[in-house]
Amino acid sequence: MQITPISKAFFDRLADAAAAAIMPHFRTALAVENKLEGAFDPVTVADKAGEVAMRELITATYPDHGILGEEFGNAGLDREQVWVLDPVDGTRSFIAGIPLWGTLIGLRAGGRATQGMMAQPFTGERFYGDGATALYSGPGGERRLRTRPCGDISEATLFTTSLRPFGDADRAAYLSVERQAKLVRYSADCYAYCMVAAGQVDLVIEAGLQPYDITALIPVIEGAGGVVTSWTGGSAVDGGRVVASGDRRLHEQVLKLLALGASETSGFIPTSRG
């Protein structure tokens, strides 16, 4: 069965609805709840309000679609088209008043990540992709997104959000790549992936992701000419350990380095994530 793509205009409507619900809480003295016993997984009224706004619009417009959301669970995951929502990806940055967060709006069709948007309402930026093309809009105007060539890790700018979700073996494998990179930065969440699509960053390596952390970003990076997979080269749509690269040559090199690093530390027992 052929699936008709959803218009970019509807993604913009969802981003507008989320922004209207979220922005009144940014850089305010809002309460923070912790969703995870024994560690810190914050959620705020902004996260919840943003997801409610998007879910209501999706249900009213596409009642036959499923929804996978971070804050309010899942509905209709067996349906052909499923929205994957993270109203505030980067809640830790949000509660610290730092605009390195974004609203992630992803769409799966037939189990594949086919369309996605990252919207940052504070900066007024949006990154949209459908796997074939990717577009930017923001203070700098509108333009097509393209990744940049980078064929070797020694010339690469590498991002990861945090090493805390990595178990010992995964951390050692990651560090075997990080040591060879030209420039390494931390704590950018979804923004780092968008910078890969924009040709500002070459590589993102992460572990412990949920589907709503990555689904929206896959079509953006792929539409800009990049590649996103698991550490073993499989689909990244369900999260877990993810590699996103702007250049396929770099991607293949990094997958080999991660595999080698993992094999050299196979005796380690992973620690709990937190």
Image (cartoon, helix red, strand yellow):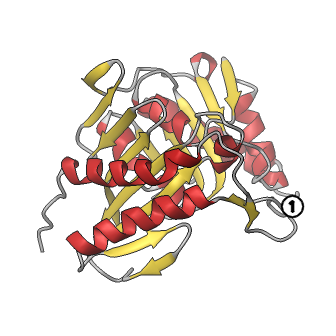
**Relative to 17, residue 254 above or below:** above
Q: Amino acid at mark 1?
A: Thr
Which of the pair 56/193 is nearer the observer?
56
Q: Is residue 224 visible?
A: yes
Q: Residue at x 15, y 67 (%)?
A: 3
Which of the pair 202/43 is nearer the observer?
43
- Residue 239 image offset from top left, x and y in percent: 55, 60
Q: Residue at x 32, y 30 (%)?
A: 136
- Residue 64 image offset from top left, x and y in percent: 23, 80
- Residue 48 image offset from top left, x and y in percent: 55, 64
| Quadrant containing the C terminus in the rendered view | bottom right
Q: How many marks?
A: 1
Q: Is residue 253 visible?
A: no
| Quadrant containing the N terminus in the rendered view | bottom left
In the rendered view, does 173 fall on the left or right side of 62? right
Q: Residue at x 81, y 44 (%)?
A: 172
Residue 232: quadrant of the picture: bottom right
Which structural element holds mark 1? Answer: loop
**Relative to 220, residue 125 above or below:** above
**Relative to 178, residue 71 above or below:** below
Residue 210: quadrant of the picture: bottom right
Q: Specify few, some or many for label 1: CA neighbours under 10 Å numbering under 14, 14-19, or 20 or more.
A: few
Q: Residue at x 19, y 58 (%)?
A: 6
- Residue 45 image offset from top left, x and y in percent: 60, 60
User: Dot 1 corresponds to which residue?
Assistant: 271
